[in-house]
Image (tube, rainbow, N blue to C red):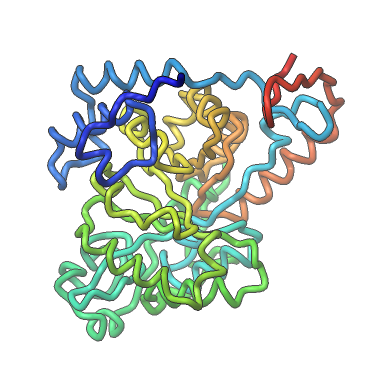
Amino acid sequence: MAVPPPALPARVAAVGPDTADPSIAAALEAALADLPVDFDPEAYVPPARVARLLAASDESLPALVQQVDMATGFRMTAAAKRPRCLGHRGVAALYPENTMASFQAALASGADGIELDIRMTKDNEIVVLHDPTLDRTTTGKGNVTDRTWDEVKQLRAVKTHLGYKDCFAKHGCDLPVPDAHPEAGPTSAPIPRLAEVMDMLLAHPRQDATMIIDIKWDNPIAIMTYLRALLERPQYASLLPRITLGIWSPHYLFALPPRSLPVKRSFIGNSIALAQLFYGSVDNFSIDKDVVAANAAWVHRRQAAGYTVSVWTVDTDVDLDAVMAVGVDDVISDCVGKCVRARDAAHDRAVGAPAVPIKVVTVGPGARAVA
């Protein structure tokens, strides 16, 4: 007779997550008991009790020694894996970030998708802005939540030249001012609502282009209610499988749409300890580039367990080479055209190299092992 799994802690069992791992559920419950809703995920250090539970859960996950092309039975190098390149806020190095012009430029340069950030106005419109305030990225000032959509749409998003130096500096060469770059976009652009970006993706010729919606931890939790209502509009049904909802805080796990809505879920952050609280509840881990480069084994273990791993924000030649060597699934960049060119060149070199035959052994229903 099968032994039933241990009961999940009451709070976690009542509202999620999807994991049945009792160690993760217990760690999540313990962490939530200590974390205020407005805590800073980028500074998270797990208490000893949570760390012990997380360590116990990690021991059962498989290790991935080599990526394998199951169709051919050859070892697949990280470069041959050909990660997807996503435009960070569009082409943030050359365009006003998080604008329609920036997103369209990213797709025109060969991006496989876009990444954007959302905020909520006073009258509950979801707008595409990174900061909780208007000051840095727009012609306005003050908190986004203090302005109505009618007020926000009178403003303009302006260039911040995000990542420009990392994207285009060359050793021994003078770096032109950003607006002198041959691919520079307009100096300002309208601030879009999320619905406008979704409409653009629906109509775009690239019907495989994806979108990551980054939901910062300092948003009001209520934004999730209005986001779900937008996603459930019938005209967006075909777009949903191409959308990933990215969250930073475990508090937001309980506000995500139900699994019946076919969007993907992602943890975003720079803390592997915090990421562990999301095991079983997300489909993807989107991690800071320096953390990925220093923790390749962790990345491989997540991939072996069925997750995808994305990395941000990758702009320099050195960083692009480093994360592609790890074998991530998605690379998010401020200069996504450069990412596409680097990815394709690395892939072409890799597939031209002699393949190493291996033995692939079936070890269970639908499972394979490398011998």
Across and down, in percent, residue 342 comes to: 66, 44
Give the answer, above or below, for where 96 lies relative to 362: below
Q: Residue at x 37, y 61 (%)?
A: 160
* 187 or 351: nearer the viewer: 351
Q: Is residue 177 visible?
A: no
Give the answer, above or below, for where 167 lies relative to 142: above
- Relative to residue 20, is residue 371 drawn left or right? right
Q: Residue at x 39, y 79 (%)?
A: 190
Where residue 83 sits, quadrant-wise, is top right
Across and down, in percent, residue 70 comes to: 77, 31
* 290 or 203: nearer the viewer: 203
Q: Residue at x 55, y 71 (%)?
A: 201
Across and down, in percent, residue 147 comes to: 18, 76
Give the answer, above or below, for where 25 lies relative to 250: above
Q: Which corner quadrant holds the C terminus?
A: top right
Identity of the residue furthest to the front in this view: 1
* 245 or 122: nearer the viewer: 245
Where residue 345 sits, quadrant-wise, is top right
Q: Is residue 47 visible?
A: yes
Q: Residue at x 69, y 37 (%)?
A: 81
- For the image, the number of numbered tags is 0
- Relative to residue 223, is residue 169 drawn left or right? right
Give the answer, above or below, for where 94 lies relative to 333: below
Across and down, in percent, residue 205 comes to: 67, 73
